[in-house]
Amino acid sequence: IMMQLPDDAEVSDELWDELVECMKGRIQDKIPLVRAFAVRALARFAVDAENGDVVELFRKSLSSESNA
């Protein structure tokens, strides 16, 4: 859902925050495909200054990822 929404979509901040937190948890999923989609969904937030923790989460996850 997150990946299909246009950048100018009208979504409440509360809903975005909830989706971001959910995807942050999915980055640690045991299924590689779920982790990959979580990273893709969060990628749109990695450029936002207020979501700097997303980039840090990417760095930590990348160092422990066993799949290409």
Image: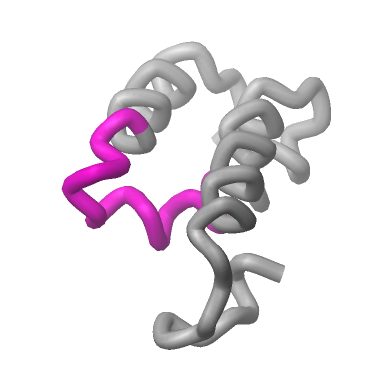
55 lies above or below 37: above
21 lies above or below 45: above
Q: Residue furthest top?
A: 64
Is residue 51 rendered to the left or right of residue 14? left
Q: Residue at x 52, y 82 (%)?
A: 10
Q: Nearer the viewer, residue 19 or 68?
A: 19
Q: Residue furthest right?
A: 31
Q: Residue at x 51, y 84 (%)?
A: 9
Q: Nearer the viewer, residue 40 or 44?
A: 44
Query: Where does the C terminus fall, quadrant-wise?
Result: top right
Q: Nearer the viewer, residue 13 or 43?
A: 13
Q: Nearer the viewer, residue 6 or 33?
A: 6
Magenta region, residue range = 39-53
Q: Tell me where residue 28 appears, x and y as whole percent.
A: 66, 21
Q: Tell me where residue 44 appears, x and y as whole percent.
A: 40, 61
Q: Residue at x 80, y 21 (%)?
A: 30
Is residue 4 rendered to the left or right of residue 45? right
Q: Residue at x 63, y 44 (%)?
A: 18
Q: Tell me where residue 1 appears, x and y as whole percent.
A: 72, 69
Which of the 4 quarters of the picture holds residue 62?
top left
Colour style of the rendered protein structure:
one colour
Q: Tell me where residue 26 appears, x and y as whole percent.
A: 70, 33
1 lies above or below 34: below
Inspect the magenta stretch and tell me whether residue 48 lies in it.
yes
Q: Residue furthest left?
A: 49
Magenta stretch secondary structure, dominant: helix
